[in-house]
Image: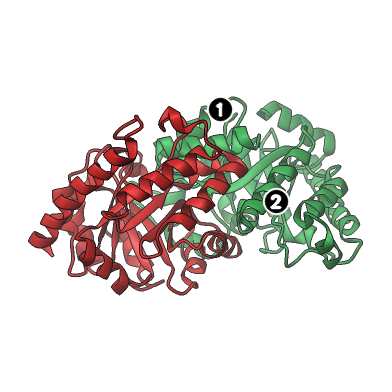
Chain colours: A green, B red
């Protein structure tokens, strides 16, 4: 899916909601555990209930890998089940030397047919570029993350000026264009969004951290939106674990609808 | 495996060789392709031929993930096949927010029972610590990598002094001790090893880049060795793809033996 098609979906649904599929066998409703593939069954019901309100799904790969081969089966079925007009993000935080990143790209772009993958920047250009060689596929590069440890290195001041995350934003723009490259920017850092928009005015930003991690959707929308919307705001736990009963999917749908309604308002106000 | 046990193995075998299992279906001998699981069959024969000379094996996870579910099966079988007195490294370059890193730790320490995993530092303390909560398991943190792009960020000069990779080495020592934490230091940067040994005198270093990537084993050994050896030097392509005929395993064994013999000399000279 290219940038124009993604923007079309956003306008059509009046939403820039990404639903995070951090599906944890210990947190899903107990009645699912008797089924053959509880993780996929949970995801299927979540997707059915939220697809009207979401423009993206983001399976968190760790939660599937933790179950080994069975987890990969659940992941593959989940990716295959997501409607094709919804953007898919393999939240994998990969990145390695060139020949190895190429293999990760094959895993998530060919084996899995995801639209995008999250990538860590520490190893630099040749660790990121192999992912950019695939048509209509995206790299979502970590820039400023929402966790406490994000400050350990990302905010270090550099001799050349600015902080490390700003250098990641600047340097990586040489590697791919706005149709291939997005950035992860945590919503708990809304004060940094204005600054980030000065450096990457046209790129899409994937913003986790709204909800459970405490970020404000209004601030993110106010400071982060550009003329193509330019935002995918993720909510995981706040949607998928909103309820733990047999009604979990319906409640997840309500939570997604609430966020979508807020987003519709912010699109009117800030787009 | 703890540090003392690893050092015992090194002394016993007079070797600090790690064999990288970057097993690529397009590069393995053609006669294996008719077998049910060519990747595992290749690894099995490589392990049989090199286990006398190696103290560690490092499967590069990307090469298995690229084959989806079948690849995970080959990986699981490979890990299970490696003799228990040989250190296993899941070369996975993972790292994410705390609850997610915990899931990756489960994948590689519980599902797979690897001794260690390579981790990327960009997301800081809470992305690394969950891996350190497992007894007798190791984090091998990226510090200074051997690829060209490593310079993009790792060598940036910081306002507080030093370069980014030095801050990664300094800061991360607060998170775990020398029995839990190693560092990746590329062999193409031997000139930096003296400096690195000033910052982390006692930690083990995993050194890729000898051989195909051009690093010198003697320089690495001279500048990198400490009184527990403190080095695991990896060779992947130089061993596993040294020959492409029916004799590939025997040739791989010879290549491993050659490296082991050199290492025995350097242990005499520098330990």
Quadrant in which the C terminus of chain B is drawn: bottom left
Q: Where is B147 relative to B137, above or below?
A: above
Q: Which residue is mark 2?
A: A234
For mark 1, give the secondary structure. Answer: loop
- Residue named by callout 1: A134
Tell me the subunit letter for badge 1.
A
- Tell me if residue A84 comes above or below residue B158 in the rendering: above
**Mark 1 to mark 2: distance in Å?**
24 Å
Q: Nearer the viewer, residue B244 or A214?
A: B244
Q: Position of residue B225 (x, y in %)?
A: 18, 61
Question: A245 above or below B45?
Answer: below
Q: Secondary structure at mark 2?
A: strand
- Residue at position x 50%, y 56% in the image: B95
| Residue A114, horizontal then vertical, whole percent | 65, 37
User: Closer to the N terminus: mark 1 or mark 2?
Assistant: 1
User: Along the line of sight, which residue is nearer the eye, A177 or B143?
Assistant: B143
What residue appears at the point 66 percent right and 53 percent down from the top-left corner? A71
Q: Quadrant of the N terminus of chain B?
A: bottom left
């Amino acid at each position: 899916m290219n940038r124009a098609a993604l923007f079309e979906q956003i306008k059509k649904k009046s939403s820039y909601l990404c639903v995070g599929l951090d599906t944890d066998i210990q947190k899903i409703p107990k009645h699912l555990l008797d089924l053959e593939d509880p993780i996929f069954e949970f995801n299927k019901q979540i997707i059915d209930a939220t697809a009207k309100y979401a423009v993206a799904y983001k399976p968190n790969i760790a939660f599937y890998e933790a179950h080994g081969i069975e987890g990969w089966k659940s992941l593959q079925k989940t990716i295959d089940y997501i409607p094709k007009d919804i953007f898919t993000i393999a939240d994998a935080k990969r990145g390695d030397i060139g020949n190895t990143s190429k293999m990760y790209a094959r895993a998530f772009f060919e084996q899995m047919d995801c639209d995008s993958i999250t990538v860590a920047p520490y190893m630099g250009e040749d660790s990121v570029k192999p992912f950019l060689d695939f048509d209509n596929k995206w790299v979502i590069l970590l820039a400023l993350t929402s966790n406490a440890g994000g400050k350990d290195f990302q905010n270090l001041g550099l001799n050349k000026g600015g902080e490390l995350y700003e250098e990641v934003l600047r340097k990586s723009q040489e590697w791919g264009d706005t149709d291939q490259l997005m950035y992860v920017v945590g919503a708990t850092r809304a004060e940094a969004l204005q600054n980030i928009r000065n450096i990457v005015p046209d790129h899409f930003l994937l913003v986790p951290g709204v909800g459970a991690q405490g970020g404000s959707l209004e601030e993110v929308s106010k400071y982060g939106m550009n003329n193509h919307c330019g935002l995918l705001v993720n909510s995981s736990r706040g949607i998928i674990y909103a309820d733990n009963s047999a009604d979990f999917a319906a409640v997840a749908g309500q939570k997604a609808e609430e966020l979508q309604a807020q987003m519709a308002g912010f699109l009117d106000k800030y787009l």
